Amino acid sequence: MAQARMIFPPDFLWGTAVSSHQVEGNNTNNDWWTWEQEDGRILHHHRSGLACNWWENAEADLDAAAQMGLNAQRISIEWSRVEPEPSVFSAAALDRYREILIAMHERGLEPMVTLHHFTNPRWLVEKGDFNVDVVVDYFQRYTAKVVDALGDLIPKWNTFNEPMVYVFMRYMADEFPAPQKHGFGPGFQAVRHMLHCHAAAYHTIKEKYPAAQVGIAKSMQVFAPRLGGNWLDGWMARRVKGVFNDLWLDSLATGQLKRPFGRGRIPHLAGSFDFIGVNYYTRFRVKFPPGREFIVRDWGDEAIVSDGAYGEVYPAGLFQVINQATRYQKPIYITENGLPDQADRLRPSFILTHLREVWRAVSFCFPVMGYYHWSLVDNFEWHNGWSQRFGLIEMDPDTQARQWRRSAHLYREICLSNSISSDMAARYAPELLATLFPGREPQSV
Ligand code: BGC
């Protein structure tokens, strides 16, 4: 049979993404650790516990990442380790992050580092976290410390991971550790403070390392009206998309706040990003009137839905959100993309179909420079505990035993060949051949 190959640019970055609390283990000093101890907060009362034991031995999984052919890796720094008490910094924690970053470089994995990925030091929460002005000074001080101690090893930074998800899950949905104040007002106040923090962190990094690339990992999903909906559902879907996908990036681009975030200008914010990190997972169906939930979980009979009704598998959406991100005219990295799939039933085809969309974007000259799959290894999935498994590598949190899923082998072939091919589809997801590579062998005469 004829072989076809979709080839990526020679300097394309192939990575996976993780975050500190989800993999390090024993992060006893942050708000999530406290939250996990309370009844009813985490599904099945799971706890992060030892997580993937990265604090002791990240190197083992970094070895696996290198074997998988990756040339990049996204991690996050845990603020509560670096600054366990206000203005008391832990040299031991910073040393350990240095070791981990050096281990990444030694294995040919270019680090991308996020400063805030959903967790807060407990002391910060007691002081009012993102609802008090002084948080901007705290965040700037923490960033400066990380820059001084580790900046020489970090070419790419994200200030925040998914600020809108953080705010929504914490202030409105009650799924993440409760802030002192709750609801839309305090939530949008937190957004404003996070934008100030972003600007402060951006300039702190760039002052010392002008060549560093600093951006943000932004959740960008597709929001479509509910099936069988009317124009009001469509209107609602556009509103939600605006608030969820666009407004934060618009503020970064212009320095201006728009409603419902607030009004006015944030000093030093305009243009304070060198790239956009896109975290894409799914297409949400939106309804009007919203009620307590504005999302409906009816995807229709044809939809492919991942474990635990996490969401619809919708590869075309990745192209759509890349297209949206291009209007900011900056390089784009896919900083997260993945699905929970314990049995690895859907993941091989998920990877191939989503990467086809990335390839399509690159082929249209959209500046997509890299792809970080979420995630390297099964890890602690926040309020869903260990019930949702996103890893290319399967991990048993009780024994810490690891096993490569088929998708890990597929991803290895992709990274090493810098391409996806009809041969890969034939071996890992033959059902896709007809749609991914629809060409036919000529009939012999
Ligand atoms: C978050 C990750 C999370 C993943 C899967 C993203 O929203 O950044 O921390 O594990 O989605 O749900």
Image: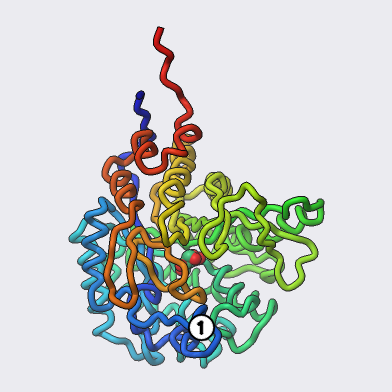
Q: Quadrant of the N terminus?
A: top left
Residue at coordinates 40% horizontally, 47% vertically from top-left? 369
- Tell me if I can see residue 46 in this picture: yes
Direction from residue 87 to residue 346 in the image, left or right: right
Identify the residue position indicated by label 1 in the image: 135
Quadrant of the rendering where the C terminus is positioned: top left
Query: How has the structure been colored for display?
Result: rainbow
Coordinates of residue 31 in the picture (x, y in percent): 47, 86
Residue at horizontal 39 percent and vertical 70 percent from the top: 379
Q: Measured along the vertical axis of the image, is residue 321 above or below residue 402?
A: above
Between 290 and 271, the residue placed more toward the observer is: 290
Which of the two residues, 182 or 273, is positioned nearer the viewer here? Answer: 182
Residue 377 point in image, percent of width and height:
34, 64
Q: Position of residue 292 (x, y in %)?
A: 73, 73
Q: Amino acid at mark 1?
A: Val
Q: Position of residue 313 (x, y in %)?
A: 54, 52
Q: Nearer the viewer, residue 395 or 246?
A: 395
Residue 194, located in which quarter of the rendered image? bottom right
* Residue 212 appears in the figure: no
Residue at far top of view: 445
Q: Where on the picture, by quarter, is residue 396?
A: bottom left
What kind of element bears circle 1? helix
Q: Is mark 1 within 8 Å of ligand 1?
A: no
**Residue at coordinates 38% horizontally, 33% vertically from top-left?**
422
Neighbor class of circle 1 (other Cα within 10 Å; few <14, some 14-19, many 20+) is many
